[in-house]
Amino acid sequence: MALVVAGLSVGSIYALIAITLNLTFWTTKTVNFGQGSILMLCAMATVFMAGAGLPIWMASLLGIAAAAITMVAAERISVRPVLKAAGSMGWAVSTLGFGILIQGIVSKYLGTQAVAFPDVVFSSSAFVQVFGIRIGLQYVVVFGFSLATICLLELALHRTVWGRVVRAVAQDRELASLFGIPVSRVVIVSFALSGALAGVAGILTAQIIGTVDPAFGFNLLISGFVAGIVGGFGRNWGALAGGLLIGVLEQVVGGYVSTAAGHGISLAVLVLMLSVRPQGLFGQEEAVKV
C-alpha cells in the first residue's frame, strides 16, 4: 500500500509535466522536447537567486517568470520557423536542440554540480497520516496542485473566451485566422503558460528530491511524455490517469523487482501502448483530410 501511495505522489508530478506539454500541443500540434530544461532552469534560477539573498517566494516567482519567457523564446526560435514547412517534423529536433542549449548555458554560468534546494512549501520532514501511512505534505501539495490545474484548465477551455479561441486554433489555424482570431498571440500565451507551469513543476519536484542540477529535467520530461501518450495527448484527464499509472508501476516494480526495472517500466508501457492503442486511453482516432 505504501508503494501505491508513493506511486500516486510521483505520478502526479508526471501528470503535471504532461499537462504543460498539452498546452503547446493544442495550439501548434508540436511537443516541446526541451521542456525538461525549462523546468530545470526555473529550479536552478530559484536556488541561486535565493542564495543571493532574495526571499524564497520572490526567487520562485522570478524563476517562474524566467521559465515563461524562455518558453516564448523557444516558440519563436525552434517552433515557429519549422512550422512554415507543411508536414515537417523538424520541431522535434529543434526543440530538443533548444533544450540542450539551455542546459549548456545553465551549466556554464550556474555550475554543473548538484545544489541543495530550499524548502518552499512545507519541509521534507512534514508528514500527514492517511490510513496509517505517513505521506509527505510536499507530495500532497504536488497532487493537489496537479488536480487543481486540470480542473481550472478544463473550466477555462469550456467556459471562457480564451478556451474557445484555443479550441478554434487547435481545430484549424488557418480558418481561425480568417475569422479574425490572433493566432500568433494565442500561441504565445499558450507557450508562456506552459513555461510557467513547467517552472512550478520544477520547483515542486526539486523540493521533494532535495537537490537540482543541469541534468535534472531530462528523466522527468521522458516520464511526463510517456504519461501524455498513455493518457492520450491533449487530454488533461488522460494526462492525470497516465501519470498516476506510470508512477504506481514505477514504484511497485522498483520495490518488488529492482530500481533499474522501475526506471525502465515507463518505456515498456510506452512501447505497449503505441502497439495496442496509439491514441492513448482517453484519446480518439482522428480522420486526416488529404
Image (tube, grey):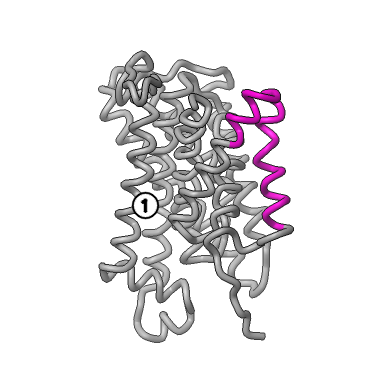
Residue 52 visible, this orientation:
no
Magenta stretch: give its range.
Answer: 249-274
Tell me which residue sits at (71%, 43%) in the image: 268
43 falls in the magenta region: no
- The chief SS type of the magenta part is helix
Say which quarter of the image contains residue 178: bottom left
Q: Can residue 2 be seen in this view?
A: yes
Residue 188's x, y, as percent? 40, 60
Q: Residue at x 55, y 21 (%)?
A: 111
Disc 1: which residue: 150
Give me the residue at 49% from left, 20% from top: 211
Nearer-the-camera pick, 15 or 200: 15
Instruction: Name the kind of residue labelled 1 in the image.
Output: Ile
Q: Where in the figure is residue 38, as x and y percent of width and height?
A: 49, 41
Front residue of 198/73: it is 198
Q: Is residue 177 above or below residue 54?
A: below
> Looking at the image, which residue sits at the far top?
125
| Left or right position of 257 against 32 | right
Q: How many marks?
A: 1
| Element marked by disc 1 | helix
| Residue 145 placement (x, y as % from top left) | 34, 40
Report whether 95 appears left or right of 61: right
Q: Is residue 261 magenta?
A: yes
Query: Residue at left 66%, top 24%?
Result: 256
Q: Where is residue 181 in the image (x, y as percent from the top left)?
A: 35, 77
Compared to residue 37, the image places residue 25 above or below, namely: below
